[in-house]
Amino acid sequence: MAAVICLSNYLVQFPFNHFQLNEIITWGAFTYPVSFFVTELANRFFGKEFARKIVFTGFFVGIILSFILSLQEFILSRIVIGSGIAFLAAQLLDIKVFDFLRNKSWFIPPLVSSLFCSILDTVLFFSIAFYGTDVNWITLALGDFAVKLLVDFVMLLPFRLAIAKYKVI
């Protein structure tokens, strides 16, 4: 979890320079949604209390390492702060929504919880990290959200394979 946070905090600085998407997507958009997958697997296999431990541990380690790696540059510090607030709020919401939907069809809990969490995370992160800067953050936020949705759908396959392998449905 901490590795996903650090990697995403670092990669959000770099535009995705393919398919003319460099103005609306950063590389961090592709790595961050994996954190929801980690939380949802922890929740499915070990329950919501264990998932919370994963989230809080990943949060503290990831934030500390991100601050160290940011070298206290202003924009990177805002990215770390925005990331921390958005991560914690979205992950805790993910745990609640997933747990509430736990007994629905296998794909409902991860898909619905990821959708709500992606919205919350995107709004919080981009408004904290980039509001008042010259970064076109609303466009980046919309692109980021679109990628999160794509990754959320893609992560359904490994989620299904994991729960089928260990017969946890």
Image (tube, rainbow, N blue to C red):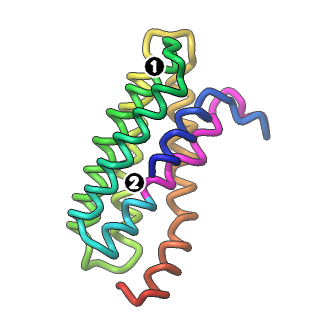
Q: Where is residue 55 shown, x and y percent of the image? A: 33, 51
Q: For the magenta stretch, what is the residue range?
A: 20-36
Q: Which residue is at a point 40% across and 56% down the rendered structure image?
A: 114
Q: Amino acid at mark 2?
A: Leu
- Residue, disc 1: 77
Residue 1 lies, with reference to residue 105, above or below; the image says above
Asked if residue 22 is among those painted magenta in the image, a careful observer would answer: yes
Q: Where is residue 59 shown, x and y percent of the image? A: 36, 42
Q: Which element is circle 1 on? A: helix
The answer to whether residue 120 is visible is no
Quarter containing the C terminus:
bottom left
Q: Nearer the viewer, residue 10 or 60?
A: 60
Q: Nearer the viewer, residue 155 or 8?
A: 8
Q: Which residue is at a point 63% across and 34% down the rendered structure image?
A: 26
Q: Where is residue 125 shown, x and y percent of the image? A: 41, 31
Q: Are marks 2 and 1 in contact (CB under 8 Å)?
A: no
- Residue, disc 2: 115
